[in-house]
Amino acid sequence: MLTSISPVDGRYYRQVSDLSSYYSEFALIRYRTRVEIEYFIALCELPLPQLADFQYSFDAMRDIYRNMTEDDAARVKSIEKVTNHDVKAVEYFIKEKFDELGIDPKYKEFVHFGLTSQDINNTSVPLSLMEGIQDVYLPNLYEIVNTLSDMAQEWREIPMLARTHGQPASPTRLGKEIEVYIVRLQEQIKSLSAIPYAAKFGRATGNMNAHNVAYPEFDWNEFAVNFVEETLGLKRSYPTTQIEHYDHIAALFDAMKRINN
């Protein structure tokens, strides 16, 4: 099922259904499509010489990923059976959509121009992580903190017997004990929010080699920074080698684990 995230999609799907839009296979296909289209638009805005006369509506092109359906994702999976390559299937899907929109075929070969699959994966995955955490995970955390804050205020004068080492200890107030968990959550939220959503973008070894050979007149490093940071809202990892080190993703999951515990 393309909208599945993990085994929790069975019994616990009601609790995690909002995350399907970010972390399912359908979502990954949509995010890859989004990055590819935004990259093509960025090339048009540069512009590359062959794209200087491109006149088609960018908004209509963005509708390809904004209005993506499960049937569209299934079409990508069907193409993948032929290409045996998931990112290449997305590229061919976009070219099909360009045909449907009546875009001149001469422009299609600039979809995915000069990129590797990891340029797409290492931007679409952190983008989905960032938006899922910002749109779903953090709002739910803030709601928990707000609920606990209301309880701490309501019960601030309620006395209770504290315990230490499993034994009865000196008295405390229920509201104060709830505040302990509020502060813990707030500190973990700060840690989580401080972790950058880093992305590798620069071809196989991070040097934008094909771009520099084909169009040496452009500053491709500046282009890559602007695309990753201004267009996608991520933090570009530079310099890099063949693949992103994923340390920031591990830090994200570690912070989320501490919060969940």
Image (tube, rainbow, N blue to C red):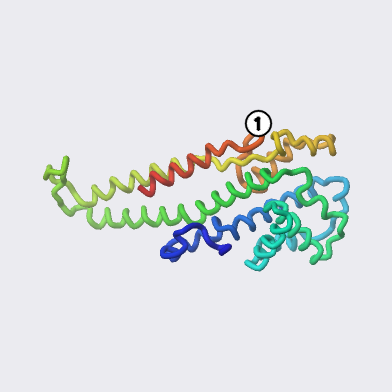
Residue 259 in the image: state x and y as whole percent: 39, 47
Q: Is residue 244 left or right of residue 64?
A: left
Residue 65 in the image: state x and y as whole percent: 67, 60
Q: State the residue in front, 126 or 232.
A: 126
Q: Callout 1, which amino acid? A: Pro
Q: Residue at x 82, y 55 (%)?
A: 108
Name the residue that disc number 1 marks. 239
Q: Residue at x 50, y 62 (%)?
A: 18
Q: Is residue 213 left or right of residue 185?
A: right
Residue 161 in the image: state x and y as whole percent: 13, 49
Q: State the residue in front, 132 or 170.
A: 132
> Quadrant of the image for the N terminus?
bottom right
Q: Is residue 160 left or right of residue 104?
A: left
Residue 46 in the image: state x and y as whole percent: 80, 45
Q: Residue at x 28, y 57 (%)?
A: 151
**186 over 28 or under it: above or below:** above
Q: Is residue 227 left or right of residue 53?
A: left
Q: Callout 1 environment at 10 Å: few (<14), some (14 to 19), or many (20+)?
A: few
**153 over 170 or under it: above or below:** below
Residue 229: which quarter of the image?
top right
Residue 239: which quarter of the image?
top right
